[in-house]
């Protein structure tokens, strides 16, 4: 009789464990979604509070636009307006000193428009290299080739 009772207890215990596992698995996904939505709501509430603070700051800034003293101060600083009877003194601007008075050879090429550089590269690509004899190998030294300017080529 003890063996039959032990089997019934084990069967009940197994059934109870299965029911608890099913309940846990059934509630896990909705609980996870609920927690995610709560964190989203908290984030949105914080963002909403920040936006309300910004709106209030902007409202106070707009309210300042109606103040004639603020308008007068802005016109004086931004537009250099003066009141009647005031004397205006203008200081001459300091002369700009060029950083490199001697132009470098590469600077002229960099300052040329893109189509001039393209044309000089195209003309230079078809021209034979100066200082190299036909049939000479890698041992021959190459001389720099200057491409003609676009205005010097016939049309």
Image (spheres, rainbow, N blue to C red):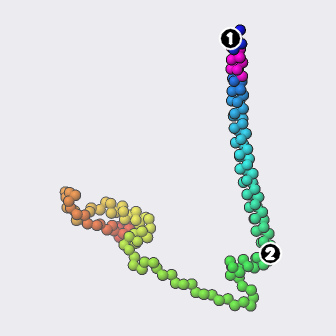
At 37% from the left and 65% from the top, the residue drawn is: 120
Mark 1 vs mark 2: give the one in front.
1
Q: Main secondary structure of the magenta part?
A: helix
Estimate the x, y position of residue 134 in percent, counting from the top left: 20, 59
Q: Looking at the picture, does residue 11 appear above or below residue 56?
A: above
Q: Within the magenta stretch, is there residue 13?
A: yes
- In the figure, residue 81 lies in which quadrant? bottom right
SS category of the residue bearing label 1: helix
Q: Are marks 1 and 2 in contact (CB under 8 Å)?
A: no
At 71% from the left and 46% from the top, the residue drawn is: 40
| Left or right of residue 99, residue 152 in this image | left
Q: Label 1: which residue?
A: 3
Estimate the x, y position of residue 111 in percent, counting from the top left: 43, 70
Is residue 151 in view? no
- In the figure, residue 21 lies in which quadrant? top right
At 36% from the left and 62% from the top, the residue drawn is: 121
| Left or right of residue 70, residue 123 in this image | left
From which residue to which does the magenta span run? 7-16
Q: Within the magenta stretch, is there residue 81?
A: no
Q: Label 2: which residue?
A: 67
Q: Looking at the picture, does residue 34 appear above or below residue 125?
A: above
Is residue 118 in view? yes
**CA–CA distance in space, label 1 to label 2:** 96 Å
Mark carried by residue 130:
none
Q: Residues within 10 Å of mark 2 (few under 14, many from 20)?
A: few
Which residue is at the far front? 2
């Amino acid at each position: 009789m003890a063996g039959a009772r032990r089997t019934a207890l084990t069967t009940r215990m197994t059934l109870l464990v299965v029911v608890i596992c099913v309940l846990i698995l059934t509630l896990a996904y909705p609980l996870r979604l609920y927690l995610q939505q709560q964190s989203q709501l908290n984030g949105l509430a914080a963002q909403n509070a920040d936006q309300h603070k910004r709106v209030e700051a902007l409202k106070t800034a707009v309210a300042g636009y109606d103040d004639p003293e603020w308008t007068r101060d802005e016109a004086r600083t931004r537009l250099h307006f003066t009141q009647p009877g005031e004397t205006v003194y203008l200081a001459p601007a300091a002369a700009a000193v060029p950083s490199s008075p001697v132009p470098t050879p590469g600077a002229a090429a960099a300052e040329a428009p893109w189509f001039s550089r393209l044309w000089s590269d195209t003309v230079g690509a078809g021209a034979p290299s100066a200082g190299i004899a036909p049939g000479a190998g890698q041992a021959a030294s190459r001389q720099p080739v200057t491409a003609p300017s676009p205005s010097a080529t016939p049309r």
